[in-house]
């Protein structure tokens, strides 16, 4: 094996963020996130089906499973933890570090019941403190729209949970007789001149108002200006039509997983 290949084998980490809607995979070489892939979450898929996706993705980027020397995983879908705990040793020869009780995260959780805080939110907090110091508000626009508040000391001090924008749009379609299913894009103006434009304005600009209003309230309660970070699969819908965000980081959960993995190697 060449010297270059040996160095790669020493530093390659597979990170896996299992969410309710999507599973995001990322491969780090040292501190650099080299590749990411996204697939739909499906609890009915077998371990072999998930493995085939990963093997094909690796092959497309000229990666080998043997290149991976560590794996970190967080999941908001408990049944899939067992699925990946089975497939990863079988196909990668490695057991994953699963973020949960007993794992060092570097995050102090100031919550009434710390076990209620999802592992993805813990990973986000770990990354936010490293990347932005504090305080930080992470707005994760996914299946749900969550606001994670991180103190300047890196503590998770609480949050807000609202319905996700896609589910809100789907509910409007499903619960009405005449309104159609729409594409989630921002219209050119707020006043809609047809039904679809009116629905798009109500949903997209309505969520902008929700996000801006909640962030304003959080900042007021904090008594200081916090860095506001957008992430999640639906961030691309909202970020072009508001100036409330200081930065967009679609990989913050994967970065947090890498940080937590490193903490547990010492």
Image: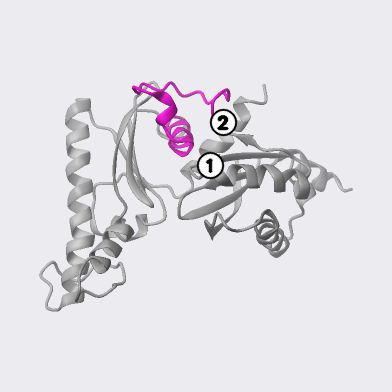
Percent across and percent down for residue 133 are: 40, 29
User: Is 163 on the left-hand or right-hand side of 196?
Assistant: right
Q: Which residues are magenta?
A: 100-129
Kindly check if marks 2 and 1 are in contact, taking CB atoms under 8 A apart as contact.
no
* Residue that lies at the very extreme toward the bottom in this rendered image: 194
Q: Is residue 154 visible?
A: no
Residue wearing tag 2: 260
In the rendered image, residue 101 lying in the magenta stretch gets the answer: yes
Which of discs 2 and 1 lies nearer the camera? The answer is 1
Most foreground residue, 222 or 118: 118
How crowded pointer 1 is (Cα within 10 Å; few <14, some 14-19, many 20+) is rated as few
Q: Is residue 161 visible?
A: yes
At 24% from the left and 51% from the top, the residue drawn is: 243
Most foreground residue, 265 or 10: 265
Residue wearing tag 1: 78
Percent across and percent down for residue 113 are: 38, 23
The secondary element bearing badge 2 is classed as helix
Q: Is residue 239 above or below residue 116?
A: below
């Amino acid at each position: 094996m060449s010297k270059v290949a040996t160095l790669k084998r020493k530093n390659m980490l597979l990170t896996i963020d299992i969410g309710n809607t999507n599973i995001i995979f990322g491969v780090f070489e040292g501190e650099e996130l080299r590749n990411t892939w996204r697939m739909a979450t499906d609890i009915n898929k077998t371990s072999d089906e998930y493995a085939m996706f990963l093997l094909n993705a690796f092959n497309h980027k000229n990666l080998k499973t043997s290149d991976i020397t560590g794996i970190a995983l967080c999941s908001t879908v408990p049944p899939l933890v067992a699925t990946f705990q089975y497939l990863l040793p079988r196909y990668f020869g490695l057991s994953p570090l699963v973020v949960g009780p007993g794992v060092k995260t570097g995050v102090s959780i100031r919550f009434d019941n710390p076990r209620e805080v999802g592992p993805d939110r813990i990973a986000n907090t770990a990354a936010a403190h490293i990347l932005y110091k504090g305080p930080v508000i992470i707005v994760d626009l996914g299946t749900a729209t969550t606001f994670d508040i991180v103190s300047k000391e890196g503590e998770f001090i609480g949050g807000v949970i609202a319905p996700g924008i896609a589910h809100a749009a789907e509910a409007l379609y499903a619960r009405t007789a005449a309104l159609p299913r729409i594409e989630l894009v921002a219209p050119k103006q707020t006043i809609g001149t047809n039904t679809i434009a009116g629905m798009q304005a109500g949903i997209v600009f309505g969520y902008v108002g929700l996000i801006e209003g909640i962030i304003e309230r959080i900042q007021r309660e904090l008594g200081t200006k916090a860095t506001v970070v957008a992430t999640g699969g639906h961030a691309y819908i909202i970020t072009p039509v508001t100036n409330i965000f200081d930065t967009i980081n679609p990989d913050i959960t994967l970065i947090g997983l890498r940080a937590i993995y490193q903490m547990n190697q010492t």
